[in-house]
């Protein structure tokens, strides 16, 4: 099974969007700019690292760049069996799984980055990676430091990140060396993320989360807070709020993904850290990091290996059934008066044979950006194949119909 993982803050680098400028997927940047209300092309193309280190810029740039790469991977016809994202990357995973719309994802990341940046100014802190130490010993070092310092990331066996005030992190780092840590690497960030020092950011993020529509993910998404699958959309606002002040259980999340049958872990976005963590955390998996267009060939070579071939059971479209496809790329907005029975006004699914909503040739199905999508077939709606707010590509199926003559 293919697993898509998405990096978090710290993976960004100056000029990371440049290799993608001539790729069709770079259009994602313009769409994200519209959603964010600011030009993001300069952020992924020209911004120096000093600018990209600022929390708000770092999160938005990493998120958008990851969506560019995701779009390119989807154009290859690949889709995941499960998703997870490290910290900020959890938002990318939720967009990739259809649990939130592209536009909502952009606006949430803007709100999150702003809120965490302010919290870092109000309660300054830092982070450090401890290498060659057990989880228990890292926790003990924090407790013995007798200050505001906590474990922030359980990244892999022998790799734990701590965070807190500068003084407390220094004391805990020294204690960690006494307990066996081989190295301590300071992390250049502007706050103690995933600790109680981020509590001030939660109210602003909660407000933004309250304005967001969540849907059931189309594939399992593993939450940072507890390394579990959450299919109930009502749970995600609380999970994302809790994530601000709770440690990222990444090693445990990788173990969950492996237990679901994950065999090929694809890191989508800038950097390559998550691929290394996957190799260290789970056995008998293959990994590939896709950060630049040239990496797409390596990905296809990997998934094309005979031993990695997988059988996917999909919907069988009989001669009496048709799909309406997207005429172009952009954000999909379904026609709100058109719905599958029992699915309300939002795209959903119904059991085979239950389709009763009639549609005629030329009827409006929805819009992709500003382009109207009209059906060339008449019949009944069986199932929506794209969700409201999803970014779709030219030729992507949007709606499944049973044609009129076979109702």
Image (cartoon, rainbow, N blue to C red):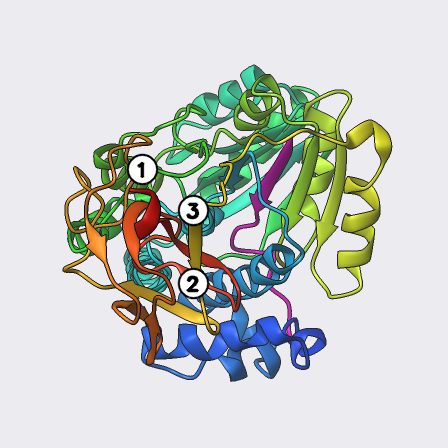
Q: Quadrant of the C terminus?
A: top left
Q: From which residue to which does the magenta span run?
A: 1-14
| Disc 1: which residue | 216
Q: Look at 51% across and 42% down and name the residue there.
A: 86
Per the image, label 3 sits on a secondary structure element best described as strand
Label 2: element kind: strand
- Which mark, residue 391? 2
Q: Quadrant of the N terminus?
A: top right
Q: Could you tell me if residue 49 is visible in this image?
A: no
Q: For this view, does 276 lie left or right of residue 35?
A: right
Identify the residue at horizontal 52%, vertical 27% (top origin): 253
Question: CA separation, marks 1 and 3?
Answer: 26 Å
Residue sitting at 57 percent across and 40 percent down?
A: 80
- Dot 1, how many residues are within 10 Å of its Cα: few (below 14), some (14-19), or many (20+)? some
* 371 versus 352 height, above or below: below
Real-space Cα separation, disc 1 to disc 2, in angstroms:
17 Å
Looking at the picture, how far across and down is residue 104, in whole percent? 30, 60
Please say if 331 is above or below 218: below
């Amino acid at each position: 099974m293919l697993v898509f993982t998405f990096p978090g803050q710290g993976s960004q680098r100056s000029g990371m969007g440049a290799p993608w400028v001539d790729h069709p997927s770079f259009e994602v940047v313009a769409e994200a700019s519209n959603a964010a209300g600011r030009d993001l092309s300069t952020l992924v193309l020209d911004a120096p690292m000093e600018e990209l280190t600022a929390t708000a810029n770092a999160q938005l740039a990493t998120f958008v760049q990851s969506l560019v790469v995701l779009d390119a991977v989807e154009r290859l016809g690949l889709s995941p069996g499960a998703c997870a994202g490290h910290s900020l990357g959890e938002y990318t995973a939720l967009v990739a799984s259809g649990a939130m719309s592209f536009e909502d994802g952009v606006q949430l990341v803007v709100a999150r980055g702003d809120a965490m940046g302010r919290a870092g100014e109000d309660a300054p802190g830092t982070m450090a990676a401890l290498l060659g130490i057990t989880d228990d010993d890292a926790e003990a070092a924090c407790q013995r430091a007798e200050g505001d310092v906590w474990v922030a990331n359980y990244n892999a066996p022998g790799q734990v990140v701590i965070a807190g005030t500068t003084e407390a992190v220094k004391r805990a780092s020294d204690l960690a060396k006494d307990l066996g840590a081989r190295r301590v690497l300071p992390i250049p960030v502007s706050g103690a993320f995933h600790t109680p020092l981020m509590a001030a950011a939660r109210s602003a993020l909660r407000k933004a989360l309250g304005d967001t529509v969540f849907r059931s993910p189309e594939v399992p998404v593993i939450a940072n807070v507890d390394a579990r699958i959450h299919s109930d959309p009502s749970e995600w606002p609380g999970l994302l709020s809790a994530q601000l002040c709770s440690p990222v259980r990444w090693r445990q999340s990788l173990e969950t993904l492996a237990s679901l049958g994950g065999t090929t872990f694809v890191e989508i976005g800038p950097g390559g850290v998550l691929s290394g963590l996957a190799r260290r955390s789970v056995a008998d998996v293959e990994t590939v990091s896709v950060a630049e267009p040239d990496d797409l060939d390596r990905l296809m070579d990997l998934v094309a290996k005979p031993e990695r071939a997988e059988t996917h059971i999909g919907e069988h479209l009989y001669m009496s059934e048709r799909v309406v496809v997207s005429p172009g790329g952009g954000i999909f907005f379904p026609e709100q008066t058109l719905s599958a029975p029992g699915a309300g006004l939002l795209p959903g699914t119904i059991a085979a044979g239950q389709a009763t909503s009639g549609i005629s040739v030329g009827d409006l199905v929805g819009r992709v950006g500003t382009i109207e999508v009209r059906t060339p077939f008449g019949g009944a709606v069986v199932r929506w194949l794209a969700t409201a707010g999803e970014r779709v590509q030219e030729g992507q199926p949007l709606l499944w119909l049973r044609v009129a003559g076979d109702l």
